Amino acid sequence: MFKEVRRRISRFAQAIRTMTSTFFVLGDQLSTEVAPWPTLPIDTVILMIESQELISQPRHLTRVSLYLAAMRQFREHVIALGFTVDYRRASNFTQGITAHRKQFEPTAIAMNTPRGRHAISLFTKLGVDLYPDPFYLTDIEEMKTRKKRPATLENFQREQRRRLNLLMDGDEPLGGQWNFDTSNREPLPRDGGTWPEPWTVSLSTAEDALVQELKDTHPGEDALTYWPRTREQALDQLRDAVERIVPHFGPHEDAASADNWHLAHSRLSPALNMGLLHPSEVVEAVMTAFAAGKIPLESTEGFIRQVTGWREWVWLLHHLRGDEYENLNFLAANNSLPGSWKEMGDHEMRCLDGVLKHLHNYGWNHHIERLMILANAATLAGINPLELSNWMATTYVDGAQWVMEANVIGMGTFGDGGQTATKPYIGGGNYISKMTNYCKGCKFSPTVRTGDDACPLTTLYWDFLIRNEEKLAKFNRIAPQRRAALGRPDRQEIQAQAPLATKILLQNKKGV
Ligand code: SF4
């Protein structure tokens, strides 16, 4: 199934036989099973750097401890393979590479291409040779030079399905349809549903000490136990996800619950984004279970789409676009990211309160909590897209610049004015009430637009459509909502209520 990917990787491996005395590994490249490792001469020095500049930023405790714990265990793994490892703590990467060069005098330093544009630019300037990124299914160089690239995610995903022969019946999709979104959009069950317990693995003594060392300087709770730090743990999490979780993924993939932070999400993204798992083995495991009748077609399709479609697509977009993309702000949204969100503290709105608590407790939200609640609220309240993107990139356990850019600036906030999505992804309280149980017990009412009980998201949903009506005129897919807003008899009252709704959304429960 993945012969093409493996052929490409072995092509890269051939090119690397001629290298180099130092191979540099970042915290999101933690695999010795990808190129160039199988052909790396054993006298190569492996360089790893803990950057104080990154560690000292106010990132979520679980995120910082996860990366450091995984890097330290990877160091032990590489030493056990027989390599010399220069594992150093430095004030930043520049200082670390300079100090390494001084001590080891390597003939050259090489690394696999970093996943983000900023990192590529930094390490290129530092004279590090970059080899093709082996952590994805798509050949980015081929994509860059193609005359005609897929214009939309849907086209890209169909191309991936055909190229990788996934869920295909000849040239047609298995089951007669390319996606099962209509079956996969069920709201949360009325009784809240029953969800598989999350996979966990206990902390080693060294990991426990690491968490103790970091906990006074980083926000959030310690949730390291929920995330794998080694290759073996990641494989175990994958096995468990395929057996117990992915079979239930599809139907409620667009729902969210105040009482459950994970639902039937696999939570494999941190392991994938750190390199502990390769997308090809994740897809292969799910396809094998599907072939054995253990995962229904709808859930398989929904899951495969996330890994081979959306994940690869946002990575490609990040590299096909230039640095100017990150400053796009089509809706002129200039409110700062509120301190109440950064603190992940108590909030008057039950939906924001719950999502921020999930983030505080686990360093993670599933994609619907990120998109339907956080990014939606940010869009409606005019929060700056880049600020939101940077915060998510550095707070979430699976966050990164390449992940968040298209997700937040494109899809989540419509900052790119339609380059990624065909319309702004917005919803008022009614939609949140339909798909989640957050509104039950909230002091606001999802159906009310004005007055003391008005749901801030409902007020701002209509206010957004009214205040942006000119900018939205060219986007056909939002025309019905725009027309409805134009025809609202209570337009003035909504606009009069909007500043209060924005204030409630931005402040915490104490009103600050
Ligand atoms: Fe959120 Fe509005 Fe529902 Fe309250 S009523 S939980 S503020 S959507």
Image (cartoon, helix red, strand yellow):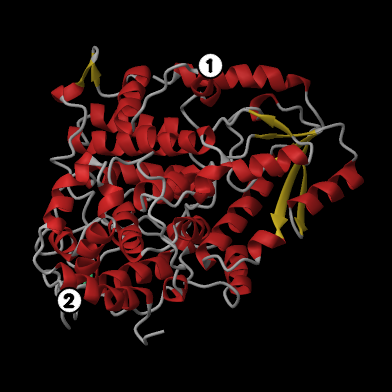
Query: Which of 401/436 is in front?
Result: 401
Q: Measured from the top left, where is residue 99 in percent x and y?
A: 86, 50
Left or right, residue 60 beside residue 113:
left
Tell me the distance, in whole angstroms, between the alpha carbons under discs 2 and 1.
Answer: 58 Å
Q: Give the residue drawn at x 72%, y 47%.
A: 48
Coordinates of residue 184 in the picture (x, y in percent): 17, 43
| Left or right, residue 240 beside residue 145 | left
In-image side of 116 versus 434 (left or right)? right
Is the distance from the Cβ of mark 2 to the nearest ligand 1 atom less than 8 Å?
no
Looking at the picture, tell me which residue is in the foreground, 454 or 508: 454
Q: Is residue 25 above or below residue 496?
A: above
Camera sees residue 91: yes
Element at label 1:
helix
Q: Quadrant of ligand 1?
A: bottom left
Count residues near mark 1 (Cα–Cα under 10 Å), then give few for <14, some for 14-19, many for 20+. Answer: few
Residue 238 percent coordinates (x, y): 39, 43
The residue to which callout 2 is attached is 454
Indicate which disc residue 385 carries: none
Compare marks 2 and 1 and give the one earlier in the sequence. 1
User: Element under label 2?
Assistant: loop
Quadrant position of the C terminus in the picture: bottom left
Q: What residue does disc 1 label?
A: 7
